[in-house]
């Protein structure tokens, strides 16, 4: 069985395509991927991938987060947060588990929570 680094996987249904933008709050359920720009909060029940060229100006909340692009706002993750080598989080991060690739950047506080809290 092939082992892959979760930060290089590209799962999810495209929610905002590369070059696209959306203004307002986004709420989704399932496995989604952002490759464009969102001006507002993103709340996902399920895993969320913020692609390498993507940018979110607002908070992010998800069951799991793979951050390859940029989030400008707090990130609250109920499970595992994985930050790729070009990820930039400009805000606080709260997660149960955390994986950070070399080169990733967090400008904020990190709070690790216990599972189920």
Image (tube, helix red, strand yellow):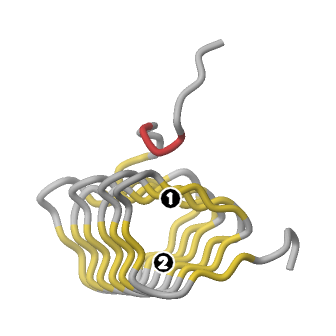
Q: Earlier in the sequence, mark 2 or mark 1?
A: 1
Rendered image quadrant of residue 23:
bottom left
| Residue 106 appears left or right of 17 | right
Labelled disc at residue 48: 1
- The one nearer the camera, 45 or 87, is 87
| Picture residue at 59% right of the left edge, 23% below the top | 3
| Picture residue at 51% right of the left edge, 86% below the top | 92
Crowding at mark 1 (Cα within 10 Å: few <14, some 14-19, many 20+): many
| SS under mark 2 | strand
| Picture residue at 53% right of the left edge, 76% below the top | 43
Q: Residue furthest front?
A: 102
Q: Quadrant of the C terminus?
A: bottom right
Labelled disc at residue 60: 2
The x and y percentages for residue 10 are 41, 39
Q: Quadrant of the N terminus?
A: top right
- The one nearer the camera, 26 or 94, is 94
**Do the residues under discs 2 and 1 have CB atoms within 8 angstroms?**
yes
Labelled disc at residue 23: none
The x and y percentages for residue 37 are 22, 70
Crowding at mark 2 (Cα within 10 Å: few <14, some 14-19, many 20+): many
| Residue 30 appears left or right of 25 | right
Considering only vertical position in the picture, is 18 above or below 77?
above
The x and y percentages for residue 38 are 28, 75
| SS under mark 1 | strand
Rendered image quadrant of residue 34:
bottom left
Disc 2 to disc 1, how far (Cα)? 9 Å
| Residue 69 appears left or right of 49 | left
Q: Residue furthest left?
A: 19
């Amino acid at each position: 069985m092939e082992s892959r680094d979760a930060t290089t996987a590209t799962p999810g249904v495209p929610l905002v395509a590369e070059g696209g933008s959306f203004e307002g709050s986004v709420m989704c359920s399932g496995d989604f991927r952002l490759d464009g720009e969102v001006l507002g909060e993103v709340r996902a029940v399920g895993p969320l991938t913020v692609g390498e060229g993507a940018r979110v100006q607002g908070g992010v909340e998800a069951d799991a987060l793979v951050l390859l692009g940029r989030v400008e706002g707090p990130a609250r993750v109920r499970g595992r947060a994985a930050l790729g080598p070009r990820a930039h989080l400009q805000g606080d991060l709260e997660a149960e588990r955390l994986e950070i690739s070399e080169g990733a950047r967090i400008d904020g506080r990190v709070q690790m929570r216990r599972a189920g809290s």
